[in-house]
Image (spheres, rainbow, N blue to C red):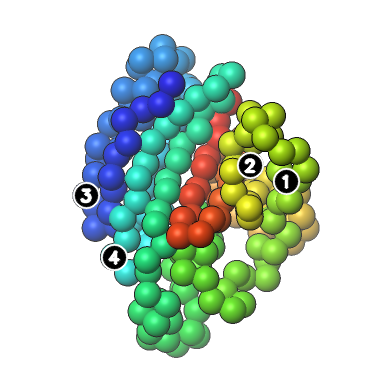
């Protein structure tokens, strides 16, 4: 099953419709109340991240499912201007994105940087999240095992989480809705496209 594709922007257009689409999917699939709430919370977190992207950004949001696993997609065409992003960051005293607090804030910052990559644009703390195992198996079997197998480069939240030993980072992870509800978050990169996929098993 694949839901309707909802076009959203970081100015707020389509965001309410995306959340409504999640509620409709949950009702259509007759999900238990807790699972329905979890899908909605994850969508709200993704839409909050979308609204915080720098520049004028547009994306497509949809949900699909397979074998009791729901996948929430946020796919953006990468046309953001690098200079615009750097100019926005230069207005910060530290030269860093001070809004990148908490797990979703940091995920949004990573997503934003991948939308318009520059040399050294991925924070060093996220390097451990890159996943190459999805490239081990080619063809349909890989796609069935891992939706993001279609992407040459995939960042995995689970791999990032497993690498964390810093207490402050663990405190953030324990407080995060995404870290506690999602089974996985992946960011796939291809020419002209960056896609975030949030996985939730029910």
Q: In the image, residue 23 lies at what x, y percent?
A: 33, 26
Q: Which mark is residue 168?
A: none
Q: Secondary structure at mark 4?
A: loop
Q: Secondary structure at mark 2?
A: helix
Residue under the point 46% across and 63% down: 115
Comes first in the chain, label 1 or label 4: 4
Q: Are marks 2 and 1 in contact (CB under 8 Å)?
A: yes
Q: In the image, residue 40 lies at what x, y percent?
A: 39, 33
Q: Is residue 3 left or right of residue 116?
A: left
Vertical relation: 43 (above or below) 170 = above
Q: Secondary structure at mark 1?
A: helix
Q: In the image, residue 120 lies at what x, y percent?
A: 61, 77
List the residue tagged with mark 4.
56
Q: Is residue 42 left or right of residue 199?
A: left
Residue under the point 55% across and 22% down: 66
Residue 76 makes an appearance in the image: yes
Q: Are marks 1 and 3 in contact (CB under 8 Å)?
A: no
List the residue tagged with mark 1.
135
Vertical relation: 180 (above or below) 116 = above
Quadrant into which the C terminus falls: top right
Crowd rating for badge 3 (residues with CA inside 10 Å; few <14, some 14–19, many 20+) = some
Vertical relation: 51 (above or below) 7 = below
Comes first in the chain, label 2 or label 1: 1
Quadrant into which the N terminus falls: top left
Comes first in the chain, label 3 or label 4: 3
List the residue tagged with mark 2.
149
Q: Secondary structure at mark 3?
A: loop
Q: Which mark is residue 13?
A: 3
């Amino acid at each position: 099953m694949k839901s309707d594709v909802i076009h959203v922007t970081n100015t707020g257009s389509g965001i309410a419709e995306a959340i409504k689409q999640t509620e409709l999917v949950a009702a259509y699939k007759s999900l238990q109340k807790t699972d329905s709430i979890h899908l909605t919370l994850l969508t709200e977190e993704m839409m909050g991240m979308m609204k915080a992207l720098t520049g004028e950004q547009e994306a497509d949001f949809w949900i699909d499912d397979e074998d009791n696993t729901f996948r929430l997609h946020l796919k953006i065409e990468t046309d953001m201007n690098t200079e615009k992003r750097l100019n926005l960051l230069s207005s910060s005293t530290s030269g860093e994105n001070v809004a990148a607090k908490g797990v979703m804030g940091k995920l949004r910052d990573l997503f934003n940087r991948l939308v318009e990559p520059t040399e050294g644009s991925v924070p060093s703390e996220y390097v451990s999240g890159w996943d190459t195992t999805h490239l081990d198996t080619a063809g349909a079997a890989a796609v069935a095992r891992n939706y993001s197998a279609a992407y040459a480069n995939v960042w995995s939240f689970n791999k990032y989480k497993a690498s964390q030993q810093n207490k402050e980072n663990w405190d953030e992870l324990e407080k995060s809705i995404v870290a506690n509800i999602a089974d996985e978050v992946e960011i796939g990169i291809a020419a002209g496209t960056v896609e975030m996929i949030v996985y939730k098993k029910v």
